[in-house]
Image (tube, helix red, strand yellow):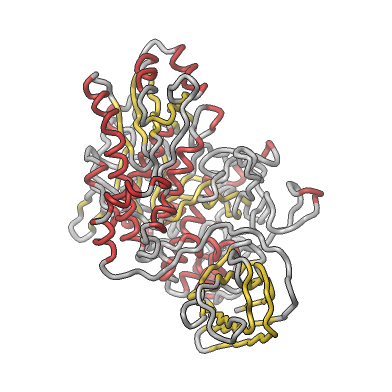
Amino acid sequence: MNRIHLTVTLPRWAQAQPSRRPAWRTHAAAGFLALLLAALPALLFALPAWAQAGAQQADGLAAISPQLERQLAAAEAPVSFLVILDEQVDARPWLEAAGAASLDRTDRAAALYAALTARAQSSQAPLRAWLDAHGIAYRPFYIVNMIEVLGDATVAQELRRFAQVDRLAANPLVAGAETIQARASWLHEIAPAAPATSVQAASLQATVALPYGLTYTRAPEVWALGFRGQGIVVASQDTGVQWDHPALKARYRGWDAQQSQASHVDNWFDAWGADSVFDPCNGNHQIPCDDSGHGTHTVGTMVGNTGASGPGILGMAPDAQWIGCRNMLNGVGTPASYAACFQFMLAPYPQGGDPFIDGRPELAPHVVNNSWSCPPDEGCDIESLRRVVETVRSAGLFVVASAGNYGSAGCFSVQYPIAIYDAVFSVGAHDSSGDLAYFSSRGPVSADGSNRLKPDLTAPGVAVYSAYRGNAYDTLSGTNMSAPHTAGAVALLWSAAPELLGDVDLTEQALLKSATPVPDGACLPGGMPASPNPSFGYGRLDVYAAVTLAQKPWQAAVRVLDAAGDPYDGVNIVFVDELTGYTYRAQTGFDGIARLPRIWAGRYTLRVGEGDGQVQVSDVVLDLAAGERRYTRQVTYAPFTATDWTFIPLFVQN
């Protein structure tokens, strides 16, 4: 039952937290994309605020990272390094300034792809011409405007002289995939834990053999509603995938069961290419493979299902499809290999093709799982990877990452990209009893000085049973196993509430607000238990609760009259979520009404006139509706003046 409890206090309530992430507007104009693309050259070069220019050093040369300087000084042969240009497209501001933020996810990705490639092609031209003239090997990128170069100290010094270059950074080999070895006593821990009470007994009987992570997160209850991830594509960026594994083959997007053949074009990419050495995949980069087993395991947790021929359902979203990219070689990756896979995900293109012209953003996956890390203390460039994930998020891709397996170091151990970023949904690990895994990294994030709350939530990550390389099955532990549970949960959520497709902000809010709170004070000032906290985040993943929340949205309309009693046009209206600090924003129109098409149940503070300076208000009408239910509350005052007036705390509950 939907109901609202509303109380009024004057003149102000409590200062709300700033927005965790701004909301997307969701009204697209027909034919707008074609107009946007036609105007793209003018848009790119008319607004210099979109380009982030970096200052050169006192000697007039572009900056160079200390790690790269040391590497070049010690090297006896050319090394791989990154040349980052100063002109960068900031994705979200660009979309908003171009009026493209309201497009659907496919058109938004297409607009962003066009902008990124145009900017990179233009600004990289002088450097690429110089590299070509000197016979120097390189790989250009557009997901971040940068070039991976294979060169020595002399080449690096010459590149630092180009006016277009912001800085040079290392491209180190780093161990990306780390799991915690499972104990022998865990190997058969696949019985369900914390069974959901709302599932019929017959349904529970059918799930007895499921890996515990599926039942703990209540995925079977979502299946019972008819949502199993159909229509959603999840993506793996990992050690690769054994595409023809019995638990995965049927759900591979490249597999045509009727024709009994596979097409790997636009469904698979190997960031290491054909020149890999000591490659268990034997350099056959055109065909999906897994040189470790780690990537196959994570895909199994997202979509795995053997049917009656094997263990049965292993994945959260057994009817979703998957695609993949190998960003690690033998468990080792580089910033360039990670960026290359994200670039493929934004706009898939054929292996050996040109990402600048062959990309197909309409084939981008919906959800991207990342069970790896890139330590800055080993040379990983924090700024570039941050820009990468912000770009793909802005295109409507939901990016999930493991929080890290450094929990034994205590608080502040969520310390490596990409888990540290606000644009990424970071996941810690708990066991079958719901207890935090000892290895699960804790926040808050201190590595970038943000003190950001991480992880966002926790999911099953201890003794997770799934598919493994060589048609096998195995049990692994790590936050690397928690992330795919969450990626699969997003697939279920978007399958059940397709109106959320590409709306990463509201999807995150649904997951956070529906998580089972776990009070903990270990990494909080004073040590008093509270939720959310830097150990469990907002709690344990509950996908059934998330679906229930998302399927019962409220619509809000706020009418504001000025001191004369006339509709007040252009007034900012803000709903601030008390739990997450997220802000829903709208502005009154000529009729004095501001509308929010979707707001989740929860505690909020309504703010009128935020950022408008002094606003004279005589009458405010709050109208909330959910389905056939409606609640209207009118608050009338003698005309008065207020600044950022906060006046209505309210509680909306399903």
Direction front: furthest residue: 564
| Left or right position of 118 against 47 | left
Q: Position of residue 145 (x, y in %)?
A: 36, 38
Residue 1 visible? The answer is: no
Above or below, comparing residue 383 to residue 31 in the picture: above
Above or below, comparing residue 405 to residue 565 in the picture: above
Q: Residue at 26% of width from left, 42% of height from top?
A: 355
Residue 76 visible? The answer is: yes
| Left or right position of 644 against 587 | right
| Left or right position of 328 against 113 | right
Q: Residue at 22% of width from left, 40% of height from top?
A: 353
Quarter of the rendering containing residue 239: top left
Q: Quadrant of the N terminus?
A: bottom right
Q: Quadrant of the C terminus?
A: bottom right
Q: Position of residue 144 (x, y in %)?
A: 38, 40
Tell which of 20 and 280 is nearer to you: 20
Q: Position of residue 269 (x, y in %)?
A: 30, 42
Tell which of 547 and 641 is nearer to you: 641
